[in-house]
Image (tube, coloured by chain):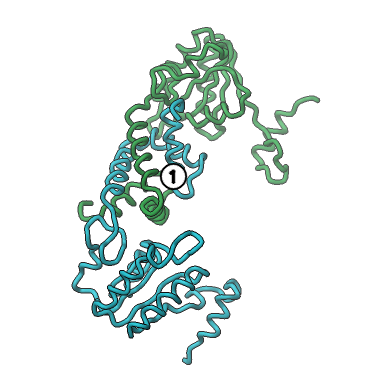
Chain colours: A cyan, B green
């Protein structure tokens, strides 16, 4: 590593970004050096700052630089609704819809015994404790992969034992989606989950 | 800017990278926070280091962290051949072929009066001075855009005045290229530039 030039070292370092390979990294380095050195210095500062200051919210496990994230702190949100999601990106996606005013719990993954991810790693004990705190409905917004299904099933069983309602976000065809291009599994789910109009 | 969270500030900062918009930036931030904090810290260090230490080679204007780049310093390369390219990426591309053993001169752009880029900005005076230093052939490896053509023409006229040979890399169909998919301009060039076999 020591005999690489500074430019080559930066190209190597940029490969830690998802979707960035050697060609893209080279293009990024040349762009920054030629046209945006200030932007690159600013990026370096912000990277350092974020890596040092961001940890997990003590209540919902989402990323935050303070102990309790703004959503958990908010008094204007409905504490009786708790939405369980896989990762922080899902919280951002749901917040963008503007249709949810409850709180969140972020698992930071799904059950995957083969990778050593069990209920402890997902903080499911914390989730149960959280539920005791005035939650009336737990909404599962977990993807329907094999691991996601197992996680949803496990969590719903645990929560039902506490006598709390559990629901799951609807599965079906996407709005604006063309039936022709929807996969068979989704279509079967949509047919089974049909509603009377 | 001040009321953005650290995560949002990092997402904004990542947009200085070419080809990175808000969605990609968000994905990058979540990936780094979840899975590669050490990589991100390393990247921050290397960014800072590169922006602070990389400047231009005094001889060829290519990026380097020392005064004179390794290619210009090399005694094993042919100093009588000088390849003129638009930007540092072109040097990397030509070096990768392994077929060129001469030296380089990097313009860092093409003539573009509308953007205020004239011969001074491209260091064409330096190029002429460099040519006086035992160069026997100048190879123009400049793209064939309108600006590139104008730049090639200008440089070749200046250098011919000094009695030095000027050549230009061949234009024609790419190796393995299917005639059917080659654009008309390239095909016309390839026909005009045909060689007896």
Point 51% across, 76% down: residue:
A173
Relative to residue A80, is residue B183 depicted above or below?
A: above
Residue B55 placement, left or right of B191: left
Residue B44 placement, left or right of B83: left
Q: How many marks?
A: 1
**Where on the picture, by quarter, is residue A156?**
bottom left
Which residue occupies the foreground of this view, A51 or A75?
Answer: A51
| Residue at the farthest left position | A75
| Residue at the farthest right position | B197
Q: Chain of mark 1?
A: A
Which residue occupies the foreground of this view, A10 or A112?
Answer: A112
Which residue occupies the foreground of this view, A193 or B151?
Answer: A193
| Residue at the farthest bottom position | A196
Point 50% across, 85% down: residue:
A193
Q: Secondary structure at mark 1?
A: loop
Q: Position of residue B134 (x, y in %)?
A: 53, 7
**Where on the picture, by quarter, is residue A125?**
bottom left
Q: Position of residue B46 (x, y in %)?
A: 37, 35
Screen quadrant of the N terminus of chain A: top left
Q: Position of residue A112 (x, y in %)?
A: 48, 64
- Disc 1 packing (10 Å; few <14; some 14–19; many ≥20): many
Q: Label 1 belongs to which residue?
A: A16
Residue A3 placement, left or right of B153: left
Q: Position of residue A111 (x, y in %)?
A: 45, 66
Point 31% across, 48% down: residue:
A51
């Amino acid at each position: 590593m020591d005999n690489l030039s500074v430019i080559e070292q930066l190209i190597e370092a940029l490969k830690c970004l998802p979707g960035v390979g050697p060609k893209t990294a080279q293009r990024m380095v040349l762009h920054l050096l030629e046209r945006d050195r200030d932007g690159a210095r600013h990026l370096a500062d912000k990277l350092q700052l974020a890596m040092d200051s961001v940890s997990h919210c003590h209540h919902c496990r989402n990323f935050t630089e303070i102990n309790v994230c703004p959503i958990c702190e908010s008094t204007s949100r409905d504490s009786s609704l708790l939405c369980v999601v896989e990762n922080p990106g899902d919280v951002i996606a749901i917040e963008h819809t503007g249709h949810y005013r409850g709180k969140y719990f972020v698992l930071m993954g799904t059950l995957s015994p083969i990778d050593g991810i069990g209920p402890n790693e997902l903080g499911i004990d914390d989730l149960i404790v959280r539920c005791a705190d005035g939650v009336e409905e737990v909404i599962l917004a977990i993807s329907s992969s094999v691991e996601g299904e197992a996680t949803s099933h496990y969590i719903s069983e645990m929560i039902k034992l506490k006598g709390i309602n559990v629901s799951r976000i609807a599965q079906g065809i996407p709005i604006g989606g063309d039936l022709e291009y929807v996969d068979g599994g989704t279509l079967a789910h949509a047919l089974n989950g049909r509603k009377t109009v």
